[in-house]
Image (cartoon, rainbow, N blue to C red):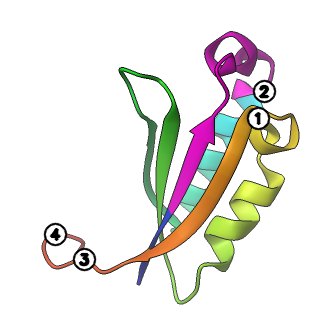
């Protein structure tokens, strides 16, 4: 199953993320290497959110990622949620 982690960022997210970006990207790479994370990226125009797609038997990996993410811990993410995603095309 797939799970999407949706982030809503603060208005000053782009200005403040630099201090936390290396750790955040490290977490992304680690989740990808473990086979939990399929893809991830920020939304643009406006830069007001991000989407991370996880694959697994439960939403736990996505939820754990959000709880440990330095962007969340340091207030750059004002809201996050995980939703199960039913894929009908692609997603090998």
* Distance of label 3 from label 4 (alpha carbons): 7 Å
Nearer the observer, disc 3 or disc 1? 3
Q: Position of residue 68 (x, y in %)?
A: 82, 54
**Marker disc for residue 87:** 3
Q: Looking at the image, can residue 34 be seen?
A: no
Q: Do the residues labelled 1 and 2 touch (CB within 8 Å)?
A: yes
**Marker disc for residue 23:** 1
Element at label 1:
helix
Q: Residue furthest right?
A: 74
Q: Are marks 2 and 3 in contact (CB under 8 Å)?
A: no
* Distance of label 1 from label 2 (alpha carbons): 6 Å
Q: How crowded is mark 1: few (under 14 residues within 10 Å), some or many (20 or more)?
A: some
> Which residue does the image show at 68% across and 49% down from the upper left?
79
The residue singled out by tag 4 in the image is: 90
Task: Tell me: 50 left or right of 43.
Answer: right
Q: Do the residues labelled 3 and 4 touch (CB within 8 Å)?
A: yes
Relative vertical location of residue 59 with respect to residue 37 in this rendering, above or below? below
Q: Give the range drawn in magenta.
A: 5-21
Q: Which of 1 and 22 is in front in this view?
A: 1
The residue singled out by tag 2 in the image is: 20
Element at label 3:
loop
* Distance of label 2 from label 4 (alpha carbons): 32 Å
N-terminal-most mark, 3 or 1: 1
Where does the C terminus fall, quadrant-wise?
bottom left
* Distance of label 4 from label 1 (alpha carbons): 30 Å
Q: Looking at the image, can residue 79 be seen?
A: yes
């Amino acid at each position: 199953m797939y799970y999407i982690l949706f982030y809503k960022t603060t208005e000053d997210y782009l200005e403040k993320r630099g201090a936390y970006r290396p750790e955040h990207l490290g977490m992304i790479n680690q989740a990808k290497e473990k086979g939990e994370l399929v893809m991830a990226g920020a939304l643009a125009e406006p830069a007001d959110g991000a989407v991370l797609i996880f694959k697994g038997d439960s939403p736990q990996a996505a939820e754990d990622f959000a709880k440990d993410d330095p962007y969340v811990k340091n207030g750059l993410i004002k809201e996050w949620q995980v939703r199960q995603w039913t894929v009908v095309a692609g997603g090998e």
